[in-house]
Image (cartoon, coloured by chain):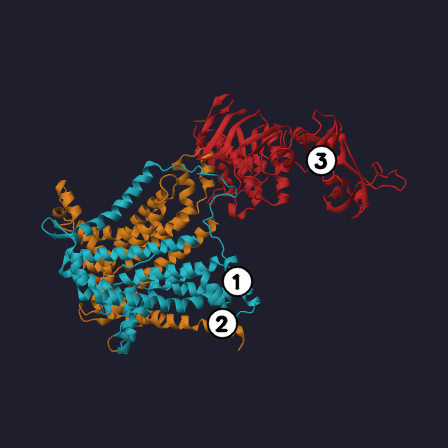
Chain colours: A cyan, B red, C orange
Amino acid sequence: MVALRTAARKRTGTGTGTGTRRPGPTGRRRRSGWSWFWLAFAAVYLLVPLYSTLQFSLQTGAHRYGLSWYGYILQQPAFRQSFVLSLRLALETVVISLVLMIPTVYLVHAWLPKLRPLMEFICTLPFVVPPIALAVGMIGLFQGVPSLISSTQILSFAYVIQALPFTYRSLDAGMLSIDIRTLNDAAQSVGASWRQTLWSVILPNLRSAILSSAFLTIAIVLGEFTISSLLLFNTFAVYMQQIGNSQAYAAAALAILSFFLTWLAMLGIFFISRRVGYRSAVGMTR
Amino acid sequence: MANLDIRQLRRQFGDVVAVDSVDLSVGSGELLSLLGPSGCGKTTALRIIAGFDQPTSGDVLLDGKSITSVPANRRNMGMVFQAYSLFPTMTARRNVEFGLRVRGVAKEARARKAAEMLSLVRLEHRADQFPHQLSGGEQQRVALARALALEPQVLLLDEPLSALDAKVRVQLRQEIRMIQTRLGITAIYVTHDQEEAFSISDRVAIMSAGRIQQTGRPAEIYRSPQNLFVAEFVGTVNRLEGTVADASTVAVGPDGAKLSVPPHDWQAGDAVTVLIRPESIAVGSPRENGSSSGSGSGRPVGHIRTHMFLGAVTRVAIEADLGLLLADVPSEHALALPLDTPVTLEIGMGGIRLMRPEELP
Amino acid sequence: MNRQAIRWLGTVPFFAYTAIFLLIPTGEIIVQAFRNPSGRFTFANVRGLFDAQILDAFETTIKISLITAVLGGVLGLLVAQSALRDGGPLWIRPVLTTFAGVASNFAGIPLAFAFIATLGSTGIVTQLLNSLGLHVYSHGFTIYGMVGLSLTYLYFQFPLMVLIISPALEGIRPQWREAAVNAGATSGQYWRLVGLPAILPSLLGAMVLLFGNAFSAYATPYALSSGYINIVPVLIGEAVNGDLAANPQLGASLAFGMIVVIAAAIAVYALLQRRAARWLR
């Protein structure tokens, strides 16, 4: 099985350049002044708001600076509750997503390629039906099921849908980069059942894709506001909004904390996906 | 038409010297090939000539004038790349017109010239196709037409046929040569395919590890390779290590078999490498009474081990006392020499060369 | 049961799940949009979409989405191309990619706060501008208005563009540029005649995606512009939570309207994407 695993690991590349190898730079133009300008512009645009927030969060009084707001926030029971709730939902979402998607994507890639266009369509639908609209639909649909709609469970169900495009794209790209057909045939030729194949051969090769999509999902869920606020749950983002209404400085500290978490998640994705060489780190909470 | 000079060209990337003191002269109307294995620096050198790269030191001169500091888009050299160079959003016709359009040439003049170039490469009927609708060979023909549309002083070709099928390659290289001669345009042709370079060039420069190993006409290089690398890179050659026995004999092989060699000035006892071209070995079957049917001397010297059918000629591998030798025999003759046949060998003096045993450069 | 049938069955969980939590709720929206309080079919809700306040909301939201899609698109393209060049430190590319990922996820409540801290009436940059003599607030600018919201949206729009357009930019063969230069073109001529046309379908498609992204935004305008300007998603939230005048079906019809707008945008996207794939093979 180890041999199968390693033998099927295909290299993915970006596909530019000719077949001949040249040492060193290939003679592309060096960065012009404009390049540096735009990069600097981007850096300023992205960093200044962060800096402003940071500055706000450190203001403990007129011209006094300190970390007291951070301490204050971290001690709030509401903070801990909302953060733990969001984190729990995030992990639930990841688990449900993976349990749902991995076998399905595997089946489609290995044996049911005709289903692929349909799957792609369904997994792109969440872009067309934005979370706000979805929330409306879900409320209308599940009104009669109070046990579902008043428990936080509904949130993770909804989040799975919201993360669907990214989970699918991650797993799909991951499966494409390992030759599923060959792996399958090889595994079957040594007598493995489809369960054994999935567990011992396919999954290890998908580790990068799985981890990437997991981190991305966590980032999305931690920052999700729309559905949870509409359904009146106290997730992390909802808590942030409430604090923002009453205590601006504490809210700034919260925002910085939230940024850090997202940044850690993105860093995780970056280091993981560097091994495989494809990029799908796009997420949206608006 | 122009002549091109390259003087002491050197290109270094950090610790790696890609091009090392290269001197080259290409005469007006001449087609010179830069031939060598992958990574030898030939493409780097060509890119410097084209202006896509700056040399670390050295100079490139066109008609005696230095162009090293002239930007790439003003050197008036047409370049044909290995692949993917046609603009995807334009038809073949518009691709060919591109240089003229950029130069501000009027529409009718552009169209006329493009049509002329496309008929030169015999693609007038495909002029309105997009690159992805053309075969690899057709794409390269369009690329050639595009390069020639501006009537450049020098034509540069960077392995233009390497990405194509074998049959297309042979056909297209003849076409390129015919067009080049007809237009009388100075050209530098980079390739790793020795047969390709030798079949179409006026002169060939063989490169390895950034240096020019030998420059000359194809026949000269073939007959008189100046070092071991060139000898082994060009065509097939038998290589035997041995020791000089006397003025006309060298002992080769594990048992010190004696081989007659042409006059030389090595000392007895010197280590030497003996090179023998397969076509210089005459293979014959021994007769019982010592005389032969072929041109052998009668004494069995080896046995046939394998046949490699190459068309008109068959290359046979013979296990001889000298070692394992490859010999070319006319294919009808090879029929009489099945495997394990004992054979005699006569090696023409003209086909033997002695060289200092050296490491490959 | 043969093996292939079992495999088909194996996909049932996925389709069942998406049916329950995606397809049927979407259908529910459409149904509710055409249903009056007593449950009968009606066009009244959809007609209600043409009410002045709601039309204004659609107009504002579409305007902001278009502006930030185009601006974000152009900006993202310039930044992506700048990051793609050789020369300069190697870390620029990965840092940009990571940050772009962060920026597109940072959106929402924290982003709103960040921009209030930056360009609010007592924001850092506002104070800086004041000290330079540019009293933007006295000239009618406010972070809560259309311009302010657009600036905030751009924070996640152009990084998103960078991420989306980078693969297309990488698909540009270096040989195209070299061939163009060899034929005598300047950098500008190359971009105008070869480079831009090659990525135009991807570019337009990406901008359409950006449009959808901005149009769907809820958290950011909620935190920033509630009560100041009308944004459709925020309106939906108000309809659901009872803030709007008694018309619960309004939420559904608004959601329906959103879906229609976005579906149109995505359809255009799919069309352009197919053309792009042909050329960059």
Residue at x 36% of width, y 68% of height: A95
The chain containing the residue under callout 2 comes to C
Q: Are marks 3 and 1 in contact (CB under 8 Å)?
A: no
- Classify A79 as above or below B35: below
What's the chain of the residue with tag 3?
B
Q: In this rendering, would C272 be left or right of B183?
A: left
Q: What is the count of numbered marks?
A: 3
Q: Mark 1 points at which residue?
A: A183
Numbered mark located on residue A271 in the image: none
> In which quarter of the view is residue C91 placed?
top left
The disc placed on residue C7 is 2
Residue B302 in the image: state x and y as whole percent.
78, 42
Q: Distance between the residues labelled 3 and 2?
A: 64 Å
Q: What residue type is labelled 2?
A: Arg
Which-is-in-front pick, marks 1 and 2?
Answer: 1
Mark 1 vs mark 2, CA separation in Å = 17 Å
Decide which of C237, C18 is in the foreground and name it: C18
Q: Seen from this angle, which residue lies furthest right?
A: B289
Image depth: mark 3 or mark 2 in front: 3
